[in-house]
Amino acid sequence: MRPDAMCRWMESKISETLPESFAIVYDGWTSGSTHYVAMFATFPNDSHRGYEKYLDFVLGVYGKDRENVVALIGDNFSTNRAFARLAGVPMIGCASHRFNLFVGDVLAEHEELLVAVNAIMKKLTNIILSAKLRRLTDLRPKQRNQTRWNSSVAMLDRYVKLKPFVPLMGLEEIDNLLLSVRQDRHIDHLLAKLIDLNSVKLELQDEAITLADVRGLFDEVVGEFPSANERLRPGASTIQDPHFETGVVKVLMHMSPSLTDQERLSIARLAVTAGIRDDDRMLDADCMSMASRAKKWRKMQQSCSGFMDCRFLRRPLTCASACFQ
C-alpha cells in the first residue's frame, strides 16, 4: 500500500473509531530543529477486554474453546484475578504468596530486633571494619533485603557465626551496637523458627506438589503457628475460589462423598462419566507388580470418585511471589 493510500485508510479508520464525545491529549517532541506535535483522543471502550478474543484465538488454534478450560492457574496479581472472574473460570492462586504473607507477619513481630542486627551487619561492611574482620574470619557480613524474607534468615545465620569474632575487633563503634544476652537468645529462637519455615517454602516449590499436599503443609504450619490461620486456612480472603480449591483437595484425598453442594458445583467441570471396565477391575492382582497394583488401585479410586485425576491442577511454579522470598 502506498504511503498516501495508507494515510487515507488510517484517517478513515480513526474517524470510524472515534465516538461522539472524547478528550484530547497533546504531546510534543523535538529532534534537532524539527518539532513534532501529536494529538491523542481518549475515550471509554471495552477494548481492554481483548483478552477474551486472544484466549479464544489461542484455543481455536488447537481446536478447543473456553468450555474445555477447567481452571486458570496463575499468581495473585489483580489482572489474573479479574481475568478469571470475567472469563468465568475458577482460579488457583499462588501458595507461596499466601505463605510469604504469613512469614511477613512473623517478621513484623520481630522488626526491632531485625533492624538492630542489620545495623551491625551494615556497620561491618565499612572498609576499615571489614578489613579488621577479614583478619579474623573469611565470613562476610550479610544484610537483609526486605522484599525477600529468606535474606533475613541468611542475615541472622551470619550474625550468629560472626558473633564470636566481633568483640575481638576491639572497636568502640561496633561494641556500642552489640546485642544483649537476652536478644541473642531471642535471635537463636527466631532463626530456628525461620529455618523451619524455610523448609516449607522449599517444599512449596516442588514441581510435583498438589493442592492436597499444599493443604497438608499449611495445616501443619497452622498447628505449629496458630497465628497463621488467617493467612493459610482453606477460606482465607486471599483465595479467589475457596470452594473450588477445597473441592479439588477433597477429590485428591478421596473424600468426594463429603463435598458440599457449593464445592460440588464449583468443580462440576472436573466431573467424568467414564469408569474402569469390569474386566479391568477383575484383573488378577497376582499377575501385577507392586508398583502396577498401586497405580491400578489409585486409578480405580479416582474413577469411583466421579472426577478427573486432579493432580494436574498444581500451584503456579513461576509466579512472582516465589521469586521474592
Image (tube, rainbow, N blue to C red):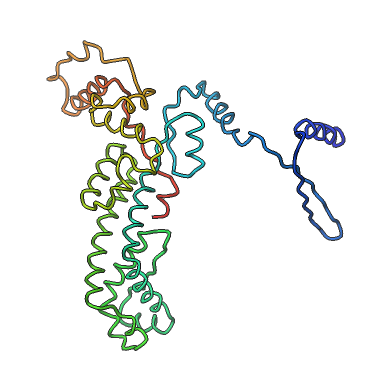
Picture layout, residue 178 above or below residue 302: below
* Residue 45 versus residue 28 in the image, above or below: above
Which residue shows up at 47% across the image and 29% down it?
88
Q: How many marks?
A: 0
Residue 198 in the image, given as x and y percentages of width and height:
29, 55
Instruction: Give the quadrant of the N terminus.
Output: top right
- The outermost residue toward the front is 21
> In percent of the image, x 40 and y 75: which residue is there?
122
Place of residue 161 in the rendered image (x, y in percent of width and height, measured from the top left): 27, 72
On screen, residue 151 above or below 283: below
Position above or below: 265 against 157: above
Give the x, y percent position of residue 32: 83, 60
Viewer-proximal residue, 286 or 195? 195
Q: Quadrant of residue 241?
A: top left
- 286 vs 159, left or right, is left
Quadrant of the image occupied by residue 153? bottom left
Image location (x, y in percent) of residue 29: 79, 55
Residue 144 vs residue 300: left or right? right
Q: Which quarter shows the C terminus?
A: bottom left
Camera-nearest residue between 45 and 201: 45
Residue at figure coordinates x 47%, y 39% from the top left: 81
